[in-house]
Amino acid sequence: MYSVPVAGLCPQGSYGIQDSLRSGFTSVKNELLPSHPLELSEKNFVLNQDKMNFSTLRNIQGLHAPLKLQMEYRAARQIQRLPFLQSSNLALDTLRGSDDTIGFEDILGDPAQSEMMGEPHMMVEYKLGLL
């Protein structure tokens, strides 16, 4: 099944400006490059940790173990709530072993305080390609 992009539904609207209804308000801070090398390292921490764990797992158990774990990660990432609700990704946290730790993003990443909230019916139709 192929989807045809509709001019009015792309992230940059038909007039070349951002669609704030679906994607939230723009932030100049998000578009800036990291100001310190450590900031870039922190943004890629989980990715670097996964690469290191996969490498160690491959050296210890063979090629099948990291491939199986990557397949489980991919399946856990596909489990989501409705498009207008943020997912907690509990299955992915359980696979990574970080489900018993409380981090900064667990407290300040509360979906109730999210700036991105739209009309639920429109967001579901957009995700399913019905619009």
Image (tube, rainbow, N blue to C red):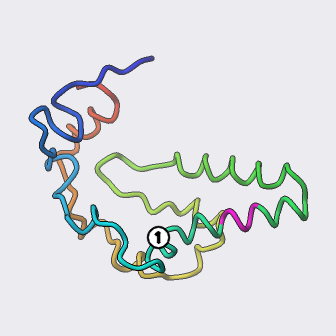
**Residue 34 versus residue 111: which sits nearer the camera?**
34
Q: Quadrant of residue 12?
A: top left
Q: Amino acid at mark 1?
A: Lys
The quadrant of the picture occupied by the N terminus is: top left
Which residue is drawn at the image coordinates 13% and 38% (left, top)? 16
Which residue is drawn at the image coordinates 66% and 72% (left, top)? 97
**Residue 61 versus residue 47: which sits nearer the camera?**
47
- Main SS, magenta region, reads helix
**Residue 123 versus residue 38: which sits nearer the camera?**
38
Pointer 1: residues within 10 angstroms few (<14), some, or many (20+)?
few
Q: Position of residue 46 (x, y in %)?
A: 57, 68
* Rendered view: 11 above or below 99: above
Residue 26 in the figure: left or right of residue 60: left
* Rendered view: 91 above or below 29: above
Residue 53 is one of the magenta-drawn residues: yes
Q: Position of residue 125 (x, y in %)?
A: 27, 32
Q: Give, as a single range, the part of the protein colored magenta.
A: 50-54
Residue 105 in the figure: left or right of residue 62: left
Q: Which residue has dot 1 on it?
A: 43
Q: Position of residue 90 (x, y in %)?
A: 53, 63
* Rendered view: 17 above or below 90: above
The quadrant of the picture occupied by the C terminus is: top left
Which residue is drawn at the image coordinates 32% and 71% (left, top)? 110
Q: Residue furthest top?
A: 1
Which residue is drawn at the image coordinates 90% and 60% (left, top)? 61
Q: Position of residue 28 (x, y in %)?
A: 20, 65
Q: Quadrant of residue 91?
A: bottom right
Q: Secondary structure at mark 1?
A: helix
Residue 121 is one of the magenta-drawn residues: no
Residue 45 in the figure: left or right of residue 122: right
Q: Residue furthest left?
A: 15
